[in-house]
Amino acid sequence: SSGTILSPNYPAQYHNNLHCTWTIQGEVGQVIRIEPEEFSLEMEYDTLKVYDGETVFNATLIGVDVRSSSNVIHLVFTSDESIRQYGFTINYEGQNMYLLPSSVTCGGYLSGRSSGVIFSPNYPGQYGNNLNCTWTIEVDVGEGIKISPADFSIEEGSDTLKLYDGGNVTLIGEYSGSCVPAPYVSLGNSLVVGFVADFVVRRTGFSARY
């Protein structure tokens, strides 16, 4: 299943005082990939939020592909009473979990594979600015996940790599600089890796095998 979501009145300016909700539901065993094509909202006051379960990908993430962790994803668009812009077009499609690649450009849901590699965007070249990437790695219940960073160069203090154990619940570590983090084995069957880059200095990023 695939389609396109448009802001109200697109390509003309959207109206004031809007609160719109879209729910995209794929087939069982699929995840939802959304890809923004056009995006113009009033800064800070008009928002598009993408809900993946309890996780909220806010407007700062729009501009890169996002994959859900299940077959349902929600989009909520809100505008205030003043300035209007031209809004957005967002393409979406359902993808079978077992067809997802083991390496994703900027985050994604990785399931159904016993191993794989994740890279920072544009690796081994320098990653871009203003990034917010989340990878969710999930294996069968009863199994654990070992993640082993192999290469690591992130702007000290400002750009960060975060590792969560158990579906974004427990923060295991927060890393930056050039010291390669030690391998980690999860307690459960899921790990979440988050990467955030600011708007200035860039580095070559990281690679990590799981």
Image (tube, rainbow, N blue to C red):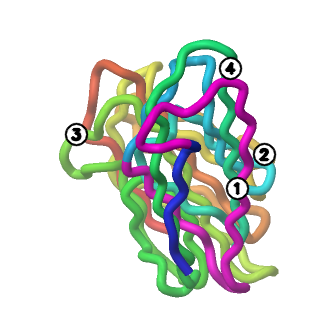
User: Which callout, 1 or 2, points at the residue further toward the start of the chain?
Assistant: 1
Q: CA distance from mark 2 to mark 3?
A: 29 Å
Tell me what residue is drawn at x 33 percent, y 49 percent: 121
Q: CA distance from mark 3 to mark 1?
A: 35 Å
The answer to whether 179 is drawn above or below residue 37 in the figure is: above
Label 2: how many residues lie within 10 Å, few (<14), some (14-19) or many (20+)? few
Q: Can residue 206 be seen by looking at this rendering?
A: yes
Label 1 or label 2, whichever lies nearer to me, is: 1
Q: Residue furthest top?
A: 82
Label 1 with label 4: CB-CB less than 8 Å: no
The answer to whether 198 is drawn above or below residue 51 in the figure is: above
The residue that disc 3 covers is 126
**SS of the residue at dot 3?**
loop
Label 3 or label 4, whichever lies nearer to me, is: 4
Q: Amino acid at mark 1?
A: Trp
Q: Is residue 158 left or right of 18 when viewed as pictured? A: left
The residue that disc 1 covers is 22
Q: Amino acid at mark 2?
A: Thr
Residue 183, image x, y percentages:
54, 56
Tell me what residue is drawn at x 61 percent, y 61 percent: 136
User: Which callout, 2 or 4, points at the residue further toward the start of the chain?
Assistant: 4
Q: Nearer the viewer, residue 76 or 122?
A: 76
Q: Amino acid at mark 4?
A: Asp
The residue that disc 2 covers is 170
Q: Nearer the viewer, residue 89 or 26?
A: 89
Q: Can residue 195 be seen by looking at this rendering?
A: no
User: Which callout, 3 or 4, points at the residue further toward the start of the chain?
Assistant: 4
Tell me what residue is drawn at x 44 percent, y 28 percent: 159
> Across the whole image, how many numbered discs are drawn on residues?
4
User: What are the residue bounds of the magenta stretch?
Assistant: 9-37
The residue that disc 4 covers is 80
